[in-house]
Image (cartoon, helix red, strand yellow):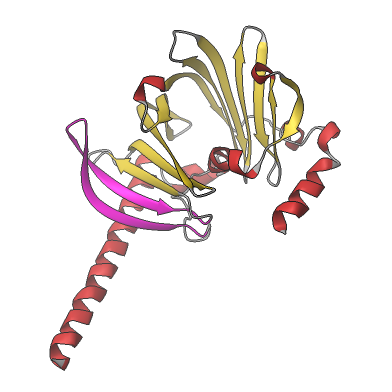
Amino acid sequence: MRQFLILLFAVLCCSVFASSQTADELISKNIKAKGGMDAIKAIKSVRMAGRLDAAGGFTGRVGQENMRPNLVRETFSLQGMTAVQAYDGSTAWQIQPFGGHKDPQLMGEDDVRDLLIDSDFDGPLVDYKAKGNTVEYLGHDTIDGDDVLRLKVTLKNGDIVYYYLDPDTFLEIRTERQEFVRGSVRENVTDLGSYKKVAGLMYPFSIASGPKNDPSSWQSVTMEKIEVNVPLGSSEFAVPASLSKEAPKRQESAKQ
């Protein structure tokens, strides 16, 4: 019996080690496919602009700016109005004129989950251990009949991102986000394609996303321009002056 238990323990250890090795190996291949770690770290800022097509036939303009280490600003423009969501590294704020809110507002903890993931300049896979994330390789899966490799990334805050990698290119062709909010689970899917090289890195120029349980409401974005190492200042992400007094109070309340 003792010999059997020792053998079983050894098999389990080897299995866990192999799984860990496989996950790290796939991450390494994914990073290499995108252009390599040196090329990734050479990028200090990114500006993206494109067209959004949504259910109902309406179109709008979208933009996103990122700056190291974790600053992000996203915009959506339609009929002369522009919605803004931004994160300055510690506080998230927004302007939502389509909801009747033309003045800046601080974002609540439940609303900021997606924005925080977008603020991770290199994404959850790069330096995942240092970020407090864990990664598991879940084996093969299929998307629309095509074989994919599936990774499970558990973020430091407990939310989960599933990565589906093309087994030939090792680029992600789909991600699924599970966000755990007040006892409920929000699930969103993003399909990625039409990869093109910009300054030595591969970026998806075709993005479709929406709730996992309602594909009919998905929105698609066609990127028209992606620029890297553009001159950006922290002021473009900073909390507006009208909220500067409220932001520290919100941060202190969140810590309690």
The answer to whether residue 210 is left or right of residue 7 is right
Task: In this rendered view, identify the residue nearer to me: 185 or 90.
Answer: 185
Residue 137 part of the magenta segment: yes
Residue at x 27% of width, y 62% of height: 19
Q: Quadrant of the N terminus?
A: bottom left
Percent across and percent down for residue 109 are 63, 44
Q: Is residue 40 above or below residue 95?
A: below
Q: Is residue 103 above or below residue 251?
A: above
Answer yes or no: is residue 2 visible.
yes
Provide the residue span drawn in magenta.
132-156
Answer yes or no: is residue 204 visible.
no
Residue at x 31% of width, y 51% of height: 26
Quadrant of residue 71 within the rendered picture: top right
Percent across and percent down for residue 123 are 49, 44
- Most prominent secondary structure in the magenta stretch? strand
Q: Is residue 71 above or below residue 193?
A: below
Percent across and percent down for residue 34 are 39, 39
Task: In this rendered view, identify the residue nearer to me: 236 or 32.
Answer: 236
Task: In this rendered view, identify the residue nearer to me: 7 or 226.
Answer: 7
Percent across and percent down for residue 111 are 60, 38
The answer to whether residue 154 is left or right of residue 240 is left
